[in-house]
Amino acid sequence: MTSISATATVAPVRRGSRLRRRFARRPTAVIGLFGVCVVVVVALLAPGLAPYAPDASDYNAILQPPGTPGHLLGTDDIGRDLLSRLVVGTRASLTAGVLATLLAVVVAVPLGMIAGYYRGWIDPIVSRVTDVVLSFPFLILAVGLAAILGPSLINAAIALAVSQVPMFVRIARGEVLSLRETEYVQASVVNGAPTRVILFRHMLPNILNPLIVQATVAIPAAIIGAAVLSFLGLGVQPPTPAWGTMLSDAQQYVSQAPWFATFPGLAIALTTLSFNLFGDGLRDVLDVRMRS
Amino acid sequence: MTDAVLEVRGLCKYFEVPRSSGGGRVHAVDGVDLTIGPGEVVGLVGESGSGKSTVAKCIVRLLEPTEGTVRLHGHDVTHLKERRLRPLRRQVHMVFQDPYSSLNPRMQISDVVAEPVRMHGIARGRRARHLVGEMLERVGLPPEMHSRYPHELSGGQRQRVGLARSLVLGPSLLIADEPVSALDVSVQASIINLLLDLQRDMGFSCLFVAHDLATVEFLCNRVAVMYLGRIVEEASREELFKNPRHPYTQSLLSAVPLPDPVLQRGRRRVLLEGDIPSPVNPPSGCRFHTRCPVAELPLCADADPQLVDHRRDRHVTACHLVRGDGQAPDVTRGADPVVHHKA
Amino acid sequence: MNNALHPPARPQVARLEVEDLHVRFDTDEGSVLAVNGVSFALQAGEVLALVGESGCGKSMTAMAVLGLLPPTATPSGSIRLEGRDISGLSQRELRAIRGRDISMIFQEPMTSLNPVFTVGHQIGEVLRRHEGLGRKEARARSIELLDLVRIPSARTRVDEYPHQMSGGMRQRVMIAMAVACNPKVLLADEPTTALDVTIQAQILDIMRDLRQELGTSIVMITHDLGVVADIADRVVVMYAGHVAETGTVDAVFANPQHPYTLGLLGSVPRPDLVLADVQDRLAEIPGVVPTLRQPATECVFAPRCPRADKTCLVRMPELTETAPGQRAACVHPGPAEAEQREAVRV
């Protein structure tokens, strides 16, 4: 029969290794990944890594500069070790950022998929609501909601999640709209597959890429958002350390003890940068994959 | 014909154009009758805007017809709800055009072929794997390839997977919507041969939709030619290619270049002027009259010709100028080897 | 004629001469040798077809001629336009030639035309640029050109936008733009592939007319053997970046030398042969087109060739004359009878 034509074939290369190789060729992406890993590891091991308890104040060592023996990054206005607070504060920031994005995804993706697949009356409603939420500036919405809900880590995450939802809904809906017309989805309909199979088996795995890329942008945005919220006193409450709170405390001492504000600021910036670089690299690699 | 596998009567499919884009209705399919018997391979040929793909999608109910009926083995499936339709879907399946988007990139090809088996509850576990494996081998893909992903296969191999998926349940009707148009020439040949072999072995009926006349003529027993949503001529393949009656069929046949320079140079070729009209505002009367080399006004612009079996030989034509005895105007007449006809 | 007064005719300088063209691509996964030692010559008023399937390098060859390769591609070899070497020219120098002496039309007219300018403006731009015409003259000439490519009501259509026109019309506009400055050579990269067959027939007829009236030499890149038979004088069959076979169209179709050409010809369904009961199965070429990452150390077609034997694995065969006026890169060239021999399969 015609099986000869089948054997001479394209060399099978597993997706994973090809993606990994492509990723490894982009130095900025690798740096980003490294930064993200550092932040994650620090967050996981936080209490163990901190030399002091984050709320241990030493009134004899107020506003010490970095390099003071025993305090690598210096101390704050009530003698707490900045390094320790920074390290433990990673937890709050990362948790808020990741949790917010996770919540947003869990709510937004099913909503977007249903709107995009069924269309009908659900689509216009979802789209309009999304547009309304999207028209509020991200931070104003988050701050407003957090103020209404009350200050706590969970509420901060919820407030941030709400502001993230529209973007994920748009992506999920858009992808599903285009996938609806692809031939393998049509083939599935002809197979007699019920809608849930089509949505979960065929659509969801194929819309993951743009969602992942959006997540790598959403997480740093949420981290900054969490920092803003805790700066305003709307996130985690003291004595739990948070980078934003540290910035807020450091306001009055900017001229006296510039390091007090610099280190939390750097932490926020570097974390965000790492996620963004990683996300860019991921997008380049996944985009090429999608095109081929 | 009570044992007809497929019976389509008066099929119409209209699409509404949103007011923002100008409004109006696209008459994609405007009154199509088609009958396919057991084991018959029928070709549906046409250019852009002919509506052939829309007909195919209406038959498998990827689209719901606006008017008319579609009957599968006598069951009226035209407006059946999905739940009632599902069991009937075992009997008809479809092969798609684009090998690169007809398979889910995240599924192994054995899973792709297994889906219909699972969806219809035909078999599970080892028995299902056996069925799938057998079908994949039948289309020329050896066992070592069964756990591969689509991107690890060539275009021709993917099309084989598509064939396996559509035939694994042994349907009685296969709709093939331009299954080889996106493949290289030499690969097309292997898929066409495969389709031919499978049809002979499995005995299914087939509606082969294509724009390439040569392929259709190679594969099909009967051929129907579509223009702007209507069938303008239908006949057995020998009849259509030896004695095309409709001016459009004649023009179409003469436009297909033969890969033989000596023969090609010696041919009388008809060149239609102008473009294919838009299906939003089809011409009045006979839809082809605006480009027809031999149109007679005002007859052809006023009256819509019906399909008539002039000589009772199952060769039907929709043209006012075909006489009662089947004599048709010869559109290729003219002094030059290339005949130009004004729009 | 008194020969003493007329010096012996100089050998015709080919309009376009490509010699030993190589194109190497650098991709994320290593380099790909897209074009490997392709040579051909195009004479005045001739239509040369470059035919092959996807991945054979025919489009790359055309892009190399015009200097349109992306930065990841490295070409080498010589390209001469009427004797003048254009392969080493800078982009600025090439811009002076493109559209004026040598031009190109592509497969997708929609993406080759700018949607925000009228067709008259776009054709006029070529004229204004290369021939220094003023706006009024450019417009008048544009209308003439639209007439030349048989666009009805050219006077009104000159002010239309691409989206208002059908695919066939747009392709004609592309042709009008391409011949506006009466170039010596026109490269046509699959110009009719995206068009319906009745529209394709119109376009091919226009191109034939242009060759007649303007004397333009055309390189027709296509995968469709029918188009080759319809319009071309000579043909170059390409496979995996190499020339498999070349000769006049009549000779190659009647007496194909290379097994690949034979396979291609046999894989096309022929209504006339089917009805005569001659063709009941299409010829298949098993396997896939290889992507070359290293220069070929054996015949590139050997893994798929029914005639391949040990002598085919020694080196990539050179293009040699295997029949009068025909050249093929094959160790076992010739018509189908050669396949009857028992060959030791690779």
Image (spheres, coloured by chain):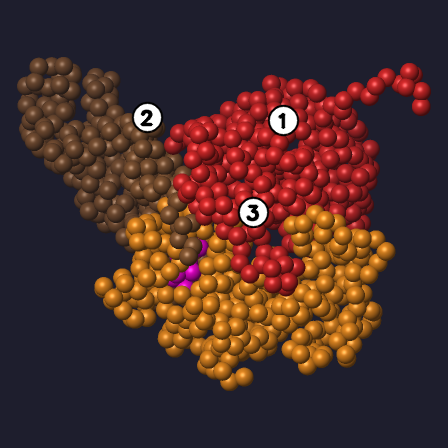
Chain colours: A brown, B orange, C red
Q: Which of C254 and B16 is in front in this view?
A: C254
Whether residue C307 is visible:
yes
B241 in relation to B306, above or below: above
- Mark 3 is surrounded, within 10 Å at the Cα level, by few (under 14), some (14 to 19) or many (20 or more) other residues, namely few
Q: Is mark 1 on a helix, strand or loop?
A: strand
Rendered residue at 75%/49% (across/down): B265
Q: Which of marks 3 and 2 is in front?
A: 3
- Mark 2 is surrounded, within 10 Å at the Cα level, by few (under 14), some (14 to 19) or many (20 or more) other residues, namely few
Disc 1/disc 2 C-alpha distance (Å):
40 Å
Does the magenta-highlighted stretch encompass residue B331?
Answer: no
Q: What is the quadrant of the C terminus of chain A in the image?
A: top left
Callout 1 amino acid: Val
Disc 3/disc 2 C-alpha distance (Å):
58 Å
Whether residue A136 is visible:
no
Q: Mark 2 points at which residue?
A: A27
- Stretch of the chain drawn in magenta: B158-166
Q: Is the magenta stretch mostly helix, strand or loop?
A: helix
Disc 3/disc 1 C-alpha distance (Å):
33 Å
Rendered residue at 16%/33% (across/down): A41
The image shows residue C122 at horizontal and vertical percentages of 70, 37
Callout 3 amino acid: Glu
Q: Is mark 3 on a helix, strand or loop?
A: helix
Callout 2 amino acid: Pro
Does the magenta-highlighted stretch encompass residue B164?
Answer: yes
Callout 3 and callout 1 share a chain = yes
Q: Is mark 2 on a helix, strand or loop?
A: helix
The image shows residue B42 at horizontal and vertical percentages of 56, 69
Q: Mark 3 points at which residue?
A: C337
Rendered residue at 30%/71% (across/down): B122
Subunit ID for the residue under disc 1? C
Q: In this view, does A16 lie to the left or right of C298?
A: left
Q: Name the residue under label 1.
A: C18
